Amino acid sequence: MAASFLAVVGVGPWGRNHCRVLEAKGWLAAAFDTDAAALAYAPEARRRASLAAVLEDPNISGVVVATPARTHFEVARAALLAGKDVLVEKPLTLDEAEGEELARLSCSLKRVLMVGHITLYHPALVELKRLLRAGELGRIRYLYSNRLNLGTVRESEDILWSFAPHDIAAFLDLTGQWPCRVGAYGGSYLREGRADVTVTHLEFPDGIRGHIFVSWLHPTKEHRLVVVGERRMAQFTDGPAGGSLTLFDAGAASGGVLNVAARDQGRVIVTGSAEPLACELEHFAACISARSEPLTGARHGLEVLRVLETARQSLLEGGVALDCATVGAVGP
């Protein structure tokens, strides 16, 4: 594998981080953005004058699509047709049918298609998943998450599509289950018809419930995910200074019993300190090399889209819970 083999298309606030990590690893071959001011954030030697210049370069194996969500389908499709493996930032697309087309195309062309659900690559969340699979928390009873911030309003998507994909992806991965019903309600305060605050409820088999609260009208930044098990509870928090995982000896057992072994501040679980974005990009590179399906591959991306689409419909219908059909075959 060549030292430089990945390109970044879209050098906005998040695309710059992709450029930073890839350049540090010696993997950045090219970068392009239609905005010259944004492109200036990429290393000068990597800047390209057009998308075609990136896609026509035979030395580039994979493309990271970090453009605005409304352009994901167009850019990712062009990259796949050019024979490139593709990592698309979340959400995969803003339309489920377009996501399905990308999935079919990647399958027929035998290209890697990965979605940037970065939370799943956070060392603390990886450890939380391991603890759950090992039975340390007991059976999951309930999950909830808050993803709140101020001033990150998007032009092409509402808060549901901008913030909630991360936590939907985490809920699907941690439970290992498909939600049978999804409901969402919220409010539009800055622009009519575009939600700034939403709460999404998910009902899973075996009585598991979850809710996701997202807002970009919050005075402080907060990302917190809590898993309530029969034996223990776990809290994952993330932020600029890094994330943490805390385990509490308290659980919600069956039969209405609250298990509380000790009322303390919880036990901080030591996890790796690797940057989640670096972990995600390393996984993408490994999948390109091994020609393997990513953890957050096409099917996973479509599953998140299906939940988002159901939540969007529920939002339009005033919060009524709707059945959430499973995703069918991804192949051509």
Image (tube, rainbow, N blue to C red):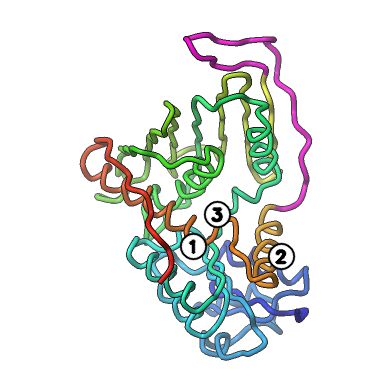
Q: Residue 298 has which mark?
A: 1
- The quadrant in which the C terminus is found is bottom left
Amino acid residing under circle 3: His
Residue 24: percent from the left, percent from the top? 77, 68
Whichever of callouts 2 and 3 sits on the residue coming sooner in the sequence is: 2
Whichever of callouts 1 and 3 sits on the residue coming sooner in the sequence is: 3
Side (left or right) of 259 relative to 178 = right
Residue 214: percent from the left, percent from the top? 44, 40
Quarter of the figure with residue 5? bottom right
| Residue at screen point 59% across, 66% down | 15
Q: Which of label 1 and label 2 is nearer to you?
A: 1
User: Which span is picked out in magenta?
Assistant: 249-275
The residue labelled by disc 3 is: 117
Amino acid residing under circle 1: Ala
Whether residues under marks 1 and 3 lie with C-beta atoms below 8 angstroms apart, the answer is no
Side (left or right) of 326 relative to 78 = left
